[in-house]
Amino acid sequence: MTGWVAIAGLGPGAEALVTPEVTATLADATDVVGYIPYVARVADRPGLTLHASDNRVEVDRARHALQMAAEGRRVVVVSSGDPGVFAMAAAVFEALEAGAPDWRDLDIRVLPGITAMLAAAARAGAPLGHDFCAINLSDNLKPWALIEKRLRLAAEADFAMAFYNPRSKARPEGFARVLEVLRAACGDDRPVIFARAVSTPEEKLTVVPLTEARPEMADMRTVVLVGSSLTRVLRAGDRPLVYTPRSAPE
Ligand SMILES: C[S@@+](CC[C@H](N)C(=O)[O-])C[C@H]1O[C@@H](n2cnc3c(N)ncnc32)[C@H](O)[C@@H]1O
């Protein structure tokens, strides 16, 4: 039996936003590996073994997936959103690089998904319509000083920004500091979108000016989008439409 590993993105939450490619691959799998809440999104069926594990064991999970594929199993590693965005695809390649040489002969595929910032941007209008960057605000795998440096430089370059993992219970002060850095670096006001649990029944979108943004508006189910100096808010009925024009002046 030939094994394989597919690293698949389940999208932001709604079933309708899972790609047909991911659905078909899950239907052909013998094993699904991933963080507990993501594995819980996969329907159980005879012949499928679900391996749910806790957060922060990404490389162990990746090794387990590669080992099972080497033994001939058809393994899907699931992430939310897109697996290449702050998720399992890079962890699998880290395990591959450090692992058994014969793992490199395996059939390994990455199946894209709709990442949180794009789902959130679509709900809000087109805030990422011009140049933008994405920053993971978690300091689990990088120093806080690097996060602040990237924030300042992104603000200086006038990018719109998307922030993943904005605020956890373990480090509630980090996002307050992010807002301070942005207020100091941006020099003017700009729209901030707090998009929580996008495409799930708990979805909530809040649009405020940077001066009114508060740390408690974000949690770990929120992706935060910050406009550039060109980003505008249009009122359409009772709905704010946030967009960044495609062109920048000379
Ligand atoms: C570990 S990252 C995983 C990102 C994922 N791979 C993606 O592409 O969306 C988890 C962070 O993604 C964001 N996120 C994931 N799903 C979301 C959703 N449905 N609504 C808002 N933010 C979401 C939050 O910022 C959360 O803290």
Image (cartoon, rainbow, N blue to C red):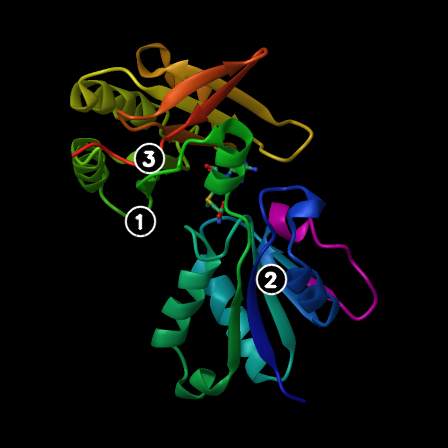
Picture residue at 53% right of the left edge, 35% below the top:
122
Vertical side of 37 occupied by 128: above or below = above
Whether residue 68 is visible to the viewer of this picture, yes or no, is no
Query: In the picture provided, is 52 more to the left or to the right than 157?
Result: right
Q: Measured from the top left, where is residue 41 in percent x and y?
A: 69, 49
Picture residue at 40% right of the left edge, 62% below the top:
90
Identify which residue, 237 or 168, lies in the foreground. Answer: 237
Picture residue at 65% right of the left edge, 64% below the top:
21
Residue holding disc 1: 141
Span colored in magenta: 36-50
Q: Kindly identify the amino acid type of the residue bearing the numbered disc 3.
A: Met
Residue holding disc 3: 161
Identify which residue, 171 or 18, lies in the foreground. Answer: 18
Query: Does mark 1 have its CB less than 8 Å from ligand 1?
Result: no
| Disc 1 element | loop
Picture residue at 42% right of the left edge, 37% below the top:
165
Vertical side of 235 occupied by 162: above or below = below
